[in-house]
Structure formats: structure tokens, C-alpha cells
Image (cartoon, rainbow, N blue to C red):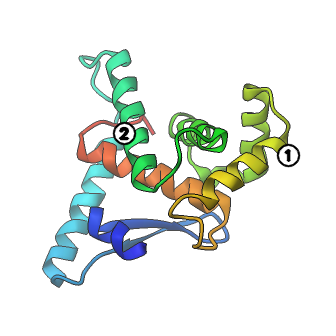
Amino acid sequence: KINKMLKRQGVLGVTDGEGKLHYMIDGRKNKSSAARQVNEFVHAFKEQMVSVTSDVPESIMEAIIEETIDEEFEFYGFDRTLFGSKVLRYMVRYCLYGGDTESRNLKELYIRAGHDLNMTVQQIERNVRYSIRGSQFGDTGLKTLHIIGALVDAVRVALASKRIGTGK
């Protein structure tokens, strides 16, 4: 599964136990290609740090972001009909607009989602766990916060390739 993710975009973000983000770059083809990928990746994220120009209407930008989230969730095999997938989408969206997962912990995300979606933390946790189990992340053993971080990073990379930033 990691091989498939690397082949798709050439880069994979992995969060460690402290919440720090590390990137794996696919350098199997050749080293110069991997170096170019790193430079392109860094350049795309630098561009993403700058807010999107004002000539793009906010409603169009939001639609592009939602479409990108849908694409990434589909790629990773999340079942759109499961409520846990909707909760994960909410958390990814929250992290995209409100900051990243490094400054947050899972309990804060569960509490926020539970409050906004009128659910208990236990319901949120159960639904998210069930949704993850059915996705490509199901057998990886990754912690939920790391999976959310990986999804946020995947969406950011995809947005950067579309030249759309999230203001973060």
C-alpha cells in the first residue's frame, strides 16, 4: 500500500509519535529525479503558504478543496456512506482551515467534531475506527492522528499540484 501511495505522487508524509511530520520521497527511478521531486514539493508548499489570490472567488476555492478531499478519500478507499468517513472529512477540513495536526491531539479533534456534529466522543471514536478499518489504512497499524495527518498532507499536496492553497 505504501508502494502504491509513493507511485501515485512520489511523496508520502508520515507523522511520528511526537506529531512531527517526515516525508518519504520515491527515489527508486533515479536520484536526480528524487532531488527534483523534493525541490518541486518544497516549492509547492512555499506557494501554498501564501494565501490564494483574491481573483479566485471563495466559493470556487472551497469547491475545489472539497473536490480534492473527495478524490483523496476515494483514493485511500474510504466508504463515503459511513458516518466515520464523514467525521474524518470534517476533521481533515478542520485541520486544513484551522491549522495542522501537529498542534492538536486526537482528543481535541474528537471533542470538536462531537460538539459540531452533536455526537459523543465515544460515538465519534467508534465511527472513525470502523471507517478506517475499511480503508487502505486498515491494516497499517497507524494511529488515528497519524492517519488524519497523512490525509491532510495528501490533500495539501494535491491542492499544491492544482496551484490552490489553503492559507496555511
The residue under label 1 is which amino acid type? Gln
Residue 126, compared with residue 10, is above or below; it is: above
Compare marks 1 and 2 and give the one earlier in the sequence: 2
The percent coordinates of residue 70 (x first, y second) are 42, 39
Q: Quadrant of residue 88?
A: top right
Q: Is residue 71 left or right of residue 79?
A: left
Can you say which quadrant of the picture contains the N terminus? bottom left
Secondary structure at badge 2 equals: helix
Can you say which quadrant of the picture contains the C terminus? top left
Q: Quadrant of residue 35?
A: bottom left
The residue under label 2 is which amino acid type? Thr
Q: Residues within 10 Å of mark 1 (few under 14, many from 20)?
A: few
Query: Depth check: 128 or 40 in front?
Result: 128
Residue at x 18% of width, y 83% of height: 31
Residue at x 57% of width, y 38% of height: 81
Q: Which residue is mark 2?
A: 68
Residue at x 66% of width, y 59% of height: 144
Q: CA distance from mark 1 to mark 2?
A: 29 Å
The percent coordinates of residue 150 (x first, y second) are 50, 58
Q: Is residue 65 left or right of residue 143?
A: left
Q: Which residue is mark 1?
A: 122
Residue at x 69% of width, y 54% of height: 130
Q: Residues within 10 Å of mark 2 (few under 14, many from 20)?
A: some
Name the disc covering residue 151, or none: none
The percent coordinates of residue 132 (x first, y second) are 61, 57
